[in-house]
Image (spheres, rainbow, N blue to C red):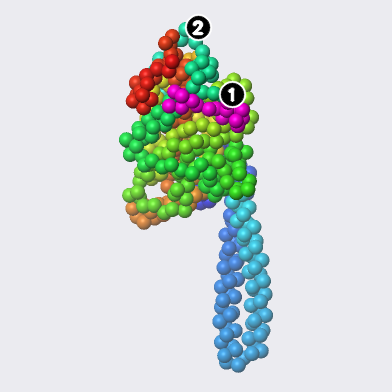
Amino acid sequence: MLQLNFIHNNKAKIIDRLAIKNFDASTIIEEIIELDINRKATQTELDKALAETNKLAKEIGNLYKTGQREKAEEIKNRSGELKLAAKDLEQALSNNISLLNEKLIEIPNIPHESVPAGKSDSDNELVYEEGNIPSLPNNAKPHWELASEYDIIDFDLGSKVTGAGFPFYKGKGARLQRALINFFLDEAIEKGYIEYQPPLLINSDSAYGTGQLPDKEGQMYHINEDSLYLIPTAEVPITNIYRNVILKSEDFPIKNVAYSNCFRREAGSYGKDVRGLNRLHQFDKVEIVQIQDPEKSYETLEEMKDQIADLLRKLELPFRIVRLCGGDLSFTAALTYDFEVYSAAQKRWLEVSSVSNFESFQSNRMKLRFKDKDGKSQFAHTLNGSALALPRIVAAMLENNQTSKGIRIPNALQGYTKFDIIN
């Protein structure tokens, strides 16, 4: 959520930058400024009425003490009128604040200056590419066929027990999942991250704090009886650890990592994009989260980007990094890099990670502050990234490493899997 002072002082800049996200902010910014001016005026009137009421109360008390009852009753009537006026002003102020907040949460985060204009992922900017595209034989199979052939992932059983998008991993498939999770966690811990195992359910305050509500309400699974949500990513519970917390500048950087199941309804997904592991309703992911000083957050974003690239390098997967254009950037992010790996049998790039800087957008919602060296309170910057999401990593690994003898396991994983081939 953008800060009110920032909106007042940067109206033209906000409208200009949000146009990069294809969001016309001209009307809503004017509405917010007008509402805030009215809020301040109403607050001033209310403060005056309350101050006058307090002053009259003391005066009435003194008049009663000195026997000036008639004059005291006269002033008491005036005090009653002020109390009624104050009550009306309090209601008007409450209505104003509610409407102001409703407007504020409609505004996306402002994209960073480096974010290119564009409407869809086809307009994203390629910033880096590494690795050789595997050359597979003509009879190479996509991962869903390999999963069935080697009996490591059962999509039909998942559909029977739950529904489409909830596969069973079995045998070496399950061990591969566990190996990847431990590998990703260990790599993050070596880089100074503290491991958490978070709850898989969150309340609405947490979903609001990181921007899932109201923007992505329809994409989350909701438990009506308890008004709880299944998490779409560990980012949500981990970042919300710091909701309503005041940190100190020496606390930075705060580096947390968490493995969790992730749940997404993926409403509207269809066609080739949902085959096999390409798009699931439940999947495993290791998430890295950092809370950082605003002056260092973009340096931190580059460090996180390099960390994710190193994971893909160790998994021997060809990958590329793209900077998301305005039209593909999320509601909450100021800058996002997407990582894509090449799926040789499908002959296309699959997104496996996003690493983002949200600047103070989430912190303002969560009231996550820190005291700087001068003792001044500021909003911290929040960042997170997938390091990594498993399904498409597994898809690319199975397809790219298929041989006539079986599916080869990358060297970096063999100490975790305890096998070097799936056959």
The location of residue 35, given as percent across then percent down, is 61, 54
Of the numbered discs in the image, which one, if any, rests on residue 334? Answer: none
Q: Which residue is mark 1?
A: 156
Given residues 419 and 353, the one toward you in this image is 419
* Residue at 37 percent of width and 44 percent of height: 254
Q: Is residue 249 left or right of residue 348?
A: left
- Residue 161 falls in which quadrant of the image? top right
Given residues 232 and 197, the one toward you in this image is 197
* Residue at 61 percent of width and 44 percent of height: 223
The location of residue 211, given as percent across then percent down, is 54, 43
Tell which residue pokes out farthest to the front in this image: 171
* Whether label 1 touches label 2, CB < 8 Å: no
Q: Residues in magenta? A: 157-175
Q: Secondary structure at mark 2?
A: loop
Residue 167, magenta (yes or no): yes
Given residues 347 and 415, the one toward you in this image is 415
Mark 2, residues whose alpha carbon is within 10 Å: few (<14), some, or many (≥20)?
few
Of the numbered discs in the image, which one, if any, rests on residue 138? Answer: 2
Which comes sooner in the sequence, label 1 or label 2?
A: 2
